[in-house]
Amino acid sequence: METQLKKGLLDVCILAAIMNEDSYGYRIIETIQPYITVSESTLYPILRRLGEAGLLEVRPVEYHGRTRKYYHITQAGIDRVNLFLNEWNEVMTIYRFVNKEANNK
């Protein structure tokens, strides 16, 4: 899969993983792992970038004597997920056309 496309999909998957409740890195990986593979070394730079873009907020929480970062989606992050869903409908329409034409040969 094209790197830029996968990067965009990872962004949206991560945002979707925290839409219903705040979460931390390892749990985000567990949530999206059945759908797309992501490592910690990939996840944390994306989380940092999404935070810098204002799509999520970070909140430190003490957990068993350590500080755990919890991520919370912002309204801008929710808007980004909704934009993705709207755009994906268009992509699926194009996919159906290409698939139909490819199968007619």
Image: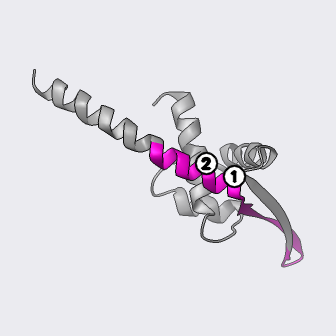
Q: What residue type is labelled 1?
A: Ala
Q: Which residue is drawn at 43% across and 42% down?
A: 88
Q: Residue tagged by mark 1? A: 76
Looking at this view, name the residue that lies furthest to the top: 105
Q: Residue tagged by mark 2? A: 80
Q: Can residue 38 be seen in this view?
A: no
> Which one is in front, 99 or 31?
99
Number of residues whose C-alpha sits closer than 10 Å to that of mark 2, classed few (under 14), some (14–19) or many (20 or more)? some
**For residue 21, which numbered disc appears in the image?**
none
Q: What residue type is labelled 2?
A: Arg
x, y (%) of residue 45?
A: 74, 43
Q: Do the residues labelled 2 and 1 touch (CB within 8 Å)?
A: yes
x, y (%) of residue 7?
A: 59, 37
Is residue 43 in the magenta section? no
Left or right of 68? Residue 17 is left
Q: Which residue is drawn at 68% across and 50% down?
A: 40
- Magenta region, residue range: 62-86
Left or right of 92? Residue 6 is right
Q: In which quarter of the image is the N terminus?
A: top left
- Residue 57 occupies which quadrant of the picture? bottom right
Q: Dot 1 lies on which element?
A: helix
Number of residues whose C-alpha sits closer than 10 Å to that of mark 1, classed few (under 14), some (14–19) or many (20 or more)? few
Q: Is residue 21 visible?
A: yes
Q: Dot 2 lies on which element?
A: helix
